[in-house]
Image (cartoon, rainbow, N blue to C red):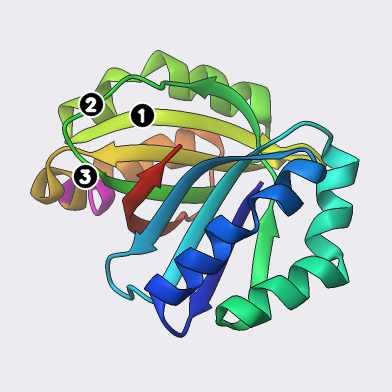
Amino acid sequence: MVSMHKVKDFDAWFAGYEAGDSMRLANGLHNYVIGRGTKDPSMVLVSVKVDDLAKAKAFSKGASLKQAMQKSGVIGTPTFTFVNLVFRDTGDISTKLRTRTSITVKDWDKWQKSFDSTRQVPTDNGLAIRGYGYDPDNNHKVTIVSGILDSTKAAAYWNSDMLKQRRIASGAGEPTRFIYTVVKRY
């Protein structure tokens, strides 16, 4: 489960988040990664591992979480997404800079085959694939998390005709990217 939201004060929010660990554990959620937006440091990404999808979805919509988030200084309405990870690399890399890319694909199997067969291409362009998967309710919604090893190469790649052609060939739509720095990995 990934939550994204704005906070008034990151340090105050983070203290409130850490204080809520028992509430998360009681709902089968386990801390994984906290990230802060690079363009907007008040934007926070929280990724947790989930024991039970139905229970996690109910928790994300519950009043207790809403109250805890408001108390810790969350501004506006948070978004929650769920990802069934197909691939995850937990090894250490030299950067805490990440990108979370969301895309819609026409056919998951075709996209995955294309993505896996060209896995070296992102690596050659300054990215280390950390994980990818799809929405458990809709495998046309795909999430890719990458470490950014070389920002200049990565930016050029994201704007390249080569990537555009790869997307078209694999049946993927236009991506949305959130670039963040890992603040804490549990």
Residue 186 coordinates in the image, percent (x, y)? 46, 37
Q: Quadrant of residue 75?
A: bottom right
Q: Secondary structure at mark 1?
A: strand
Is residue 5 something one can see in this rendering? yes
Tag 3: residue type? Answer: Tyr
Q: Position of residue 60 (x, y in %)?
A: 78, 59
Q: Which residue is mark 1?
A: 129
**Percent coordinates x, y for residue 73 in the rendering:** 55, 82
Marks 2 and 3, the one that precedes in the sequence? 2
Residue ID for mark 2:
123
Choose between 53 and 17: the one closer to the eye.
17
Residues tagged 1 and 2 counted as in contact (Cβ below 8 A):
yes
Give, as a three-letter code, the residue at label 2: Thr
Q: What's under tag 1, amino acid-wise?
A: Ile
Secondary element at image label 2: helix
Q: Secondary structure at mark 3?
A: helix
| Pointer 3 residue | 157
Q: Is residue 176 above or below residue 151?
A: below
User: Front-most of 109 and 40?
Assistant: 40
Q: Earlier in the sequence, mark 3 or mark 1?
A: 1
Q: Range of the magenta residues?
A: 156-160
**Going 84% across and 64% down the picture, which residue do you hit?**
61
Residue 158 falls within the magenta-colored stretch? yes
Q: Main secondary structure of the magenta part?
A: helix
Q: Is residue 49 above or below residue 89?
A: below
Q: Residues within 10 Å of mark 3 (few under 14, many from 20)?
A: some
